[in-house]
């Protein structure tokens, strides 16, 4: 049976964090066994918000190494760098003709970026979802393992597929966001302020590169409160976030203990001790992060290996990208000889 095609990418804008791991990479690692997978380092996307490229090479190498250290096998998947595939830029141009300004201006990620960087509202930032659609459609991927923050971009990509297929004939299948769980994952920043992200709020972000003492320090000062006021209360999002992390890295009986403590607590009878919960979480998180960090450092020390991974990845990805661009040009009457 023909395997379904999967695509996903991570921007080279800094160190990877737990949001990237639980929202994206963990799925990649599982999917590589079952699907025809393309994963890439999105270095073009990083230019929209990080125009200074002096650290870009280091950052691309790091994201590559972090993906491999988390379990991606360059022999099983095509692991490549976005700028090694100029076919994506060509498809981006065609898709831009069916991308409407009003629709792009409404995307929450665009609005966020404008708020964060009001002095650099460039056209590439506005058309970020168009480039993302080109990334996906260049391999005619149908499953896109991403975090919840990307859901709307997938909807936009499906709009372009419908518009393209309607205008020029059936070339693309519709891509969908994918997660093994029932819902897409979102890891919050440890202060509860928005999602965990690579370049903002670094003291409240847990990076795969963090040393043990940093992990402990950050978790111990994560936001909590004085506890629930009634039994079985709904958890505030910053508390739920700590439980989400606990469920990921701690033993089931540990999780159950704190769940029970929370559910049995009320005003005047607070059983749950957030200090203990955070201490346990910090300990388990150190066990989780340390082997990944050590592996990343070993891979980064072998530049020849990294270069060969990127070269082989680009060659694999090119085969599929060329086939798509040929089909697109044909459908659009752009083939003259
Ligand atoms: P980015 O860091 O924006 O390049 O995102 C790379 C991947 O990680 C995308 O699939 C995102 O959906 C996912 N991701 C980033 N931040 C988070 C987060 N805080 N929670 C869950 N997934 C995330």
Image (cartoon, grey):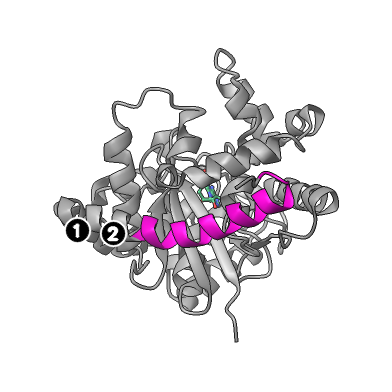
SS of the residue at dot 1? Answer: helix
Farthest residue to the front: give it. 337
User: Going 52% across and 79% down the picture, which residue do you hit?
Assistant: 34
Q: Decide: marks 2, 1 in contact (CB < 8 A)?
A: yes
Q: Nearer the viewer, residue 161 or 224?
A: 161
User: Going 77% across and 32% down the picture, which residue do you hit?
Assistant: 106
Q: Is residue 220 above or below residue 298?
A: above
59 within the magenta span: no
Label 1 environment density (alpha carbons within 10 Å; few <14, some 14–19, many ≥20): few
On screen, residue 9 versus residue 112, left or right, reads left
Q: Nearer the viewer, residue 103 or 23?
A: 103
Q: Which residue is mark 1?
A: 305
Q: Which residue is mark 2?
A: 309
User: Going 23% across and 52% down the picture, which residue do you hit?
Assistant: 307
On screen, residue 121 versus residue 223, left or right, reads right
Image coordinates of residue 4 in percent, x first then y, are 60, 74
Number of residue marks: 2
Query: Which image quarter is the N terminus in?
Result: bottom right
Farthest residue to the bottom: give it. 1
Farthest residue to the top: give it. 119
Residue range (magenta): 313-334
User: Going 50% across and 27% down the picture, which residue do you hit?
Assistant: 49
Res 259 seen here: yes
Does the closest atom of ligand 1 sit within 8 Å of the Cβ of label 1?
no
């Amino acid at each position: 049976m023909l395997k379904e095609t999967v695509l996903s990418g991570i921007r080279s804008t800094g160190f990877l964090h737990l949001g990237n791991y639980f929202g994206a990479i963990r799925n990649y690692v599982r999917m590589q066994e079952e699907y025809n997978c393309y994963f890439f380092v999105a270095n073009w996307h990083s230019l929209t918000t990080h125009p200074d490229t002096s650290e870009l090479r280091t950052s691309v190498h790091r994201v590559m190494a972090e993906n491999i250290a988390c379990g991606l096998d360059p022999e099983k998947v095509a692991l490549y760098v976005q700028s090694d595939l100029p076919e994506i830029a060509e498809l981006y141009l065609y898709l831009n003709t069916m991308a409407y300004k009003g629709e792009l201006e409404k995307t929450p990620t665009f609005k966020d970026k404008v708020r964060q960087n009001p002095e650099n509202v460039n056209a590439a930032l506005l058309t970020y979802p168009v480039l993302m659609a080109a990334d996906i459609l260049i391999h005619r991927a149908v499953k896109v393992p991403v975090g919840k923050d990307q859901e709307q971009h997938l909807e936009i990509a499906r709009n372009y597929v419908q518009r393209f297929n309607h205008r020029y004939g059936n070339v693309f299948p519709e891509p969908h966001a994918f997660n093994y769980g029932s819902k897409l994952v979102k890891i919050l920043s440890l202060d509860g302020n928005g999602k965990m992200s690579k370049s903002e709020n670094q003291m409240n972000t847990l990076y795969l590169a963090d040393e043990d003492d940093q992990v402990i320090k950050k978790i111990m000062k994560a936001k909590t409160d004085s506890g629930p006021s009634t039994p079985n209360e709904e958890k505030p999002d910053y508390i739920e976030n700590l439980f989400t992390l606990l469920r990921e890295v701690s033993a089931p009986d540990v999780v159950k203990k704190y769940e029970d403590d929370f559910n049995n607590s009320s005003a005047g009878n607070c059983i749950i001790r957030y200090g203990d919960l955070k201490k346990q979480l910090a300990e388990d998180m150190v066990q989780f992060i340390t082997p990944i960090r050590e592996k990343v450092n070993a891979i980064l020390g072998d530049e020849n290996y990294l270069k060969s991974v990127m070269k082989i990845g680009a060659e694999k990805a090119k085969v599929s990208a060329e086939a798509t661009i040929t089909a697109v040009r044909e459908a659009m009457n752009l083939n003259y000889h």
